[in-house]
Amino acid sequence: MEIHKALFEYCLRLADSSLILGQRLGEWCGHGPILEEDIALTNISLDFVGHATALLQYAAKVEGKGRTEDDLAYHRSEREFKNVLLVEQPNGDYAKTIARQFLFDTFQYYYYQALQESKDETLAALAQKSFKEITYHLRHSSQWVLRLGDGTAESHERIQNAINDLWMFTGDLFDMDEVDALLIKEGIAADPGQVKQKWNDHVAELFKKATLQMPAPTYMQRGSREGKHTEHLGYLLAEMQYLPRTFPDAKW
């Protein structure tokens, strides 16, 4: 595989995960459990969309076919999206949203920490620019895991059940293929294998503080790097892409 094709694919993976999670969090707008959290989740959603925009702009530049970030966001099919499976899972109740957020925030924190050392100056700069926001995201979701886990019997049960339900999608975060191998060799991509232990240690430590149990080893769902997704992504894209596809020539 040529490096520029691998880099394009890699940028899509990073961008799509942020874009889809941003869309998911945006669904909480006007529905948050308290006003402060309604605003917080909306702002975090905007952070993710901002990350995705910058990465899709770079992906379009690398591809060199005249497409824009909007083309890549709104005019690709479900199988063309490369986001990790975790972020496309439905919001559920607030505990499930927080569990999903914490598991991804922890991964993104350590991954983008490593990505700042990329030999690709654009990726390194984007990772560095995003890292402050990612640090806040992790702090926010960590505080809520502690609050729910070490709270009432009901809040503890809800967050534990959410973690148990989502755990099967965490293995997908660390999968690797030829794109990863090539770009890691070139010093461009971060290595998921080196991130995994840090992720596991951080998650285990916080779960212990929150009186939560690490789920038992289980079968892991995989396929995001091949564009294989759960049924939920198709419904999300149908809503997200409706207006641009209905009015493709409209200027916003």
Image: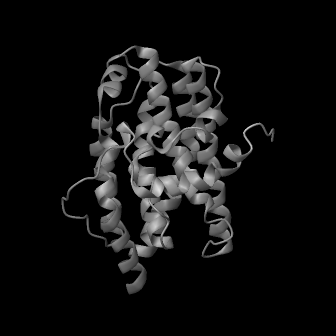
Question: Which residue is at a point 56% across and 22% down the rendered structure image?
Answer: 122
Residue farthest toward the front in the current orientation of the protein = 246
- The vertical placement of 222 against 113, above or below, is below
- Pick the front one: 20 or 215: 20
Question: Which residue is at a point 30% across and 47% down the rendered structure image?
Answer: 222
29 displayed left or right of 82: right
- The vertical placement of 66 against 13, above or below, is above
Q: Quadrant of the C terminus?
A: top right
Instruction: Indicate the position of residue 170 as horizontal and vertical percent values.
Output: 32, 52
- The vertical placement of 117 against 21, above or below, is above
Residue farthest toward the top in the current orientation of the protein = 2
Instruction: Indicate the position of residue 111 as horizontal and vertical percent values.
Output: 41, 38
- The vertical placement of 148 against 132, above or below, is below
- Pick the front one: 43 or 210: 43
Question: Which residue is at a point 40% across and 41% down the rendered structure image?
Answer: 110
99 displayed left or right of 41: left
136 displayed left or right of 188: right
Instruction: Indicate the position of residue 125 as horizontal and vertical percent values.
Output: 57, 27
Q: Is residue 116 at least partly visible in the picture?
A: no
Question: Which residue is at a point 54% across and 40% down the rendered structure image?
Answer: 131
- Pick the front one: 97 or 84: 84
Residue farthest toward the left in the current orientation of the protein = 217
Q: Quadrant of the N terminus?
A: top left
- Quarter of the image for residue 149 reads bottom left
Q: Which colour style is shown?
A: one colour
